[in-house]
Amino acid sequence: MKVYSKTDIGLVRQSNQDFIINKIFSESTAWSIVCDGMGGAKAGDVASKTAAIKISEFFEFSLEKGPANDMCQLHLEAIKYANKIIFQSTLKNEELKGMGTTVVIAMVYENCLHISHVGDSRAYLIRDDIITQLTVDHSVVQEMVEKGEITEEAAQKHPRKNLITKALGVNETITCDYNKIKVQKNDIIMLCTDGLTNYLNSEEIQKILLENNSENSIDILINQAKNLGGNDNITVSVIEI
């Protein structure tokens, strides 16, 4: 199992509010956490970094005590823990008021892939040359798609595409979406922020990942997003099974 990742400021933003943590905990356990902060340059940075670090620490502390009996609950508790810390920071510091962050987590544990997320940062699985999106955006545009008001194609370019309906740190309580699947040899798991998916669709991502090794694929994906505008921070993480 190998993990590769990279984050890029893009071409427009003055700071990079994305943050990523990868951890290979053991031969059979690893995780990647990708966050996309919001709420002003300083606040967005604080929110994304805090979320990624606190969730990773929570996982490590919990798994060091022994095997996890309920991985869904472990993910939810880790996200709640990070949410509480971020939310309390907004109450104590006026400069941080209104900050929040997306989070998407991929954890490989006991031959299973555990995915949880809040917001519109995404997880994909490439298996047998087919790409599958494992997360559903918590966004205004996704809700419009689900109601049949717009198509998936229209959603890609919709002016309200970046409005999310859920984020860590914004409210005192939080829930997350969780998914679990068995992993197979040669699976590729990719996490990314919307700085990538605002420009590249699933088929374009799949083509790049299949035609290049994972490390080179990340650079190519980021450069493609920048060539097409790069108006947001871009973060990509790849786990190879």
Image (spheres, rainbow, N blue to C red):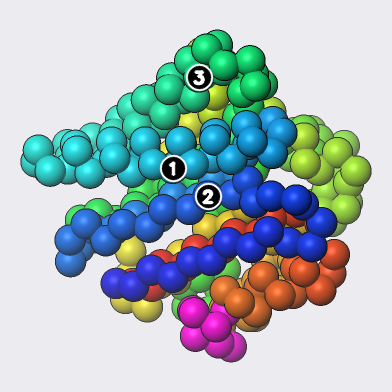
147 or 153: nearer the eye? 153
Which image quarter is the N terminus in? bottom left
Q: Amino acid under label 2?
A: Phe
| Label 1 or label 2, whichever comes before in sequence order | 2
Q: In the figure, 211 relative to 103: above or below?
A: below
Identity of the amino acid at label 1? Ala
Image location of residue 121, percent across then percent down: 60, 47
Number of other residues with Cα within 10 Å of mark 3, as a class: few under 14, some 14 to 19, many 20 or more: some
In the image, residue 72 sits, relative to residue 198, either above or below, namely above
Mark 1: give few (<14), some (14-19) or many (20+) Cα within 10 Å: many
Residue 214 covered by magenta stretch: yes
Q: Which mark is residue 19?
A: 2
SS at mark 2 in the image: strand
| Residue 19 visible in this rendered orientation of the protein | yes
The earlier-in-sequence mark between 3 and 2 is 2
Q: Earlier in the sequence, mark 3 or mark 1?
A: 1
At a point 85% along the width and 64% down the height, the residue shown is 229
Camera-side residue: 147 or 83? 83
In depth, the one of 232 and 177 nearer the eye is 232
Q: Which residue appears at 61% of the width and 23% of the height?
A: 96
Q: Secondary structure at mark 1?
A: helix
Q: Which residue is mark 3?
A: 89
Amino acid type at image mark 3: Ser
Q: Quadrant of residue 240?
A: bottom left
* Res. 52 mark: 1
